[in-house]
Every structure is written in structure tokens, then in C-alpha cells.
Amino acid sequence: MSVVIRQPGVVLTDHLFQVPLDHAVPGGERIEVYAREVVAAGKERAELPWLLYLQGGPGGRAARPVGRDTWLDRALDDYRVLLLDQRGTGRSTPATRQTLPPRGDAATQADYLAHFRADSIVRDAELIRRALLGEQGRWSLLGQSFGGFCTLTYLSLAPDGLREAMVTGGLAGLRSSAADVYRAAYPRVARKNAAHYARYPQDVEAVRRVCEHLLSAPAELPDGGLLTVEAFQSLGLMLGRGNGSDLLHYLLEDAWVRGGAGPELSDTFLAGVRAELSFAEGPLYAVLHESVCAQRSVDPGPTGWAAQRVRSEFLGFDAAKALANGDPVQLTGEMIYPWMFETDPALRPLRETADLLARRTDWPDLYAPDVLAANEVPVVAAVYHDDMYVDTADSLATAGAVRGLRTWVTDEWEHDGLRVSGGKVLDRLIRMAHGEA
């Protein structure tokens, strides 16, 4: 029996579905997938079109709404929304340091997680669509970031299930390998560093001071994690968010207190760093991050910790050299490194599993360029100018490869524009999809 909850302005209904772990073996192991239906209060029985929302990630559960917040306020004017916890996240048979080891050794865990990419997520969604809408029912799709990658997979594998698709900050390169993605990413991250230091020039010295301290004495975080120089540099992930530069500056403001033995990193700072760096709430983000780019027809080899390999090509991200030369220390961005599975307690038990996935070479293709070239589903996409997380050039190339896809390129928001725009981004996309803009 479904659980129904009322909040101001909305009615929420829980849905649980049993799906095959491996859709190629429908009679094999099954896992549970959770989704939350959201409808405007008073419209519970209305004949509304469905809108499936695919969250960013990988490894991110769907947002937990509180009334008609953020983009939902606009969506609920027109749609009945389904917030999907993608397999392995939230309430959908979560895959974490606690749940994976009981399955067996690292090889068994890696084989299990090989079924947690966009192709499996799309096939889950198709089973759910049939259960809720019937065989002939079609729904609209909204994909944010990694959810946009999944949207391209949906258009490749099951376009007949869609009436329209909207993407925000998530047009992946159809033929980009993991190494290609990072070669394009490091220069974007360097630009975000330069913009941050131009806005907050005092942070040049603030970052250098923290790095100098950590080189000699890595700090322990409140959860038992280890803050090394490299881990501190990964706070640059914040620079791709709309207010990330400001929040990073405020975090650095609180870096130091005077203790009994002199200046030391403050508990406030270390707690803030832990909140930004820990993968406890979404370990699959780290474990599967490079695999979301893996396609055997693009690169038949392993992803092989591509972010770490490619980093050596960009010497500006070497903190020790920057300190020695008196240069600003460059922070990194949306990169996953093997050392994270040593410094983060939420990832340590999954280190060998992640390494096996990084060595894997048999990843199926996620996109069908020929199908996309003949696409008949209305597709619109917000492309954020100089998006730090998803390459704009890749996005525009993909837009040109999907028949009929219309783009809106904007510099008004960063990658999180869907969440922070108060529904403006979604309103523009809805109007575009309906031929009104």
C-alpha cells in the first residue's frame, strides 16, 4: 500500500518497484527501486501528464521536496512529477560501504555495480512507466547533469516512451572518452580558479597558507577522514556552483584559530571541509564516476583513473610546485582520484572494488548516434556557458547530433541553475518544448 503525505501545496505518494538487477536476465536477482510522486494539492485526481525527473550524479538520490520548492513550483503547474531514486541511491537498494561488502569480495561487488549505469537506470524507468502509465503511455523527462546523460541514453534505447525531453547542464559528449572529458575539464577548472582569485584576491594567500600547513601535517576531519593537500585542493568542486566561490571564501575565512600551541586549523573549518568532501551520502558518485563515460566503441580500454593520469599533463595543479614558485595554488574540480579511497572513510572499504571498475574494459555503449540522428522526440536543453562540470563544446556538438534538439545557451546561471533559478530555467525549457519560445 502506497504511503501518502500532504505538505503545503503538494501531495506526495511513495512507490516501490521490483526490477531485475540485470535487465538481460529478467528472471535473475531483483532489486528495489523507489520513486516519489508529487502532485499539486487539489489536482490529485486530475488527468495530468507525467514528468520523470532524473537527478544529477551519478549516485545522487532525488531531491526530498518541502512543498512547492525550487523548480517543482513551476513543474507542478503542468505535470504530475515522479522523483526517481536511481538504483543504488536513496531508498533504491542503496549501494554503500555498509551494503556492498555483505555481497561478497571486491570482484563480486564490481560485477554487481556494473549494472548501475545509465542503461540500467533507463530500463528501470521503462518498467516503471509501464506500471504507472500503461504500455502505450508516454511521459515527459527532465534530466539534470548526469540525469541529462541518462536522457540521451533514454533517447537512444527507448524513445517511444517519451513525449518530450528537457535537459539542464547535461548534454554529454557522445564520443568522448574519460580521458577526453578530463583534458577538456582541467582548463575550465583553471578558468574558475582565476575568476575566484580575481574576485577574492586575499584567498590566494589563504589557500597557500593552508596548503603549506597540510604539506607538513595533514589534518584529521571530524569523521576520521584525512585532509591532505590534494584533498584540500578538491574543494575546487565548489567553484562550479552559482554561489560556490562565495561559500569557498567564507570557508577559508574560518580556517584558523589560535590554540595552546599557536595557530591551528579550526574545528569550524574542518567541519565545513568534511561536509564538502565526504562521499558518505553518495559513494556511487566516486565509485562509478569515470564509468559513466565508458563505451567500448569509443575507447575499448579501461578508464584507468583517467582524472589522475590526465592531471600530470596540467602542471599548474601541482600544489608543491606552486608553493615553491610563489604561484597561486590551483584547486581541482569534478575529478575522482584513487587516493580518495584512502582519505575518505565512506570510500575506504570500496577501494579494491573501485579499482576493479577502473580496470574494466567491457562497458557497453550508452548512446546510439544513429538513433539520435533520426530522433523524433522534442528535445530542448539549457547549456550553461563555460559550465565547469560539463564541457560546453561537447554539449553543443551533441546538440547538433540529435535531430531536432534545440538549445538555450545562457551565462545567467552556473551548473545548478535548475535548482537556484526559482523555476525560471524550467519555465523557459517548457515553453521551448511546446514551441512557445
Image (cartoon, helix red, strand yellow):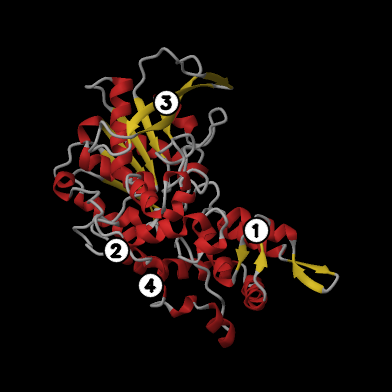
**Mark closest to the chain's N terminus, 2 or 1:** 1
The disc label shown at residue 224, or none: 1
Q: Residue at x 32, y 62 (%)?
A: 359
Task: Find the distance from the CA under tag 2 to the CA under tag 1.
Answer: 31 Å
Frontmost of labels 1 and 3 is 1
**Mark closest to the chain's N terminus, 3 or 2:** 3
Q: Quadrant of the C terminus?
A: top left
Check the image and name the residue furthest to the bottom: 325
**Mark closest to the chain's N terminus, 4 or 3:** 3
Up the image or down, 75 lies above or below 337; here it is above
For the residue carrying disc 4, how many other residues have a C-alpha within 10 Å: few (<14), some (14-19), or many (20+)? few
Frontmost of labels 2 and 4 is 2
Q: Residue at x 17, y 50 (%)?
A: 369
For the residue carrying disc 1, how many other residues have a C-alpha within 10 Å: few (<14), some (14-19), or many (20+)? few
For the residue carrying disc 2, how many other residues have a C-alpha within 10 Å: few (<14), some (14-19), or many (20+)? many
Viewer-side residue, 125 vs 357: 357
Frontmost of labels 4 and 1 is 1
Task: Find the distance from the CA under tag 2 to the CA under tag 4.
Answer: 12 Å
Task: Find the distance from the CA under tag 3 to the CA under tag 2.
Answer: 35 Å
Q: Check disc 1 and give the amino acid type.
A: Gly
Q: Is residue 435 visible?
A: no
Q: Which residue is denoted by mark 3 in the rendering?
A: 16
Task: Find the distance from the CA under tag 1 to the CA under tag 3.
Answer: 35 Å
**Mark closest to the chain's N terminus, 2 or 4:** 2
Q: Check disc 2 and give the amino acid type.
A: Pro
Q: Check disc 3 and give the amino acid type.
A: Leu
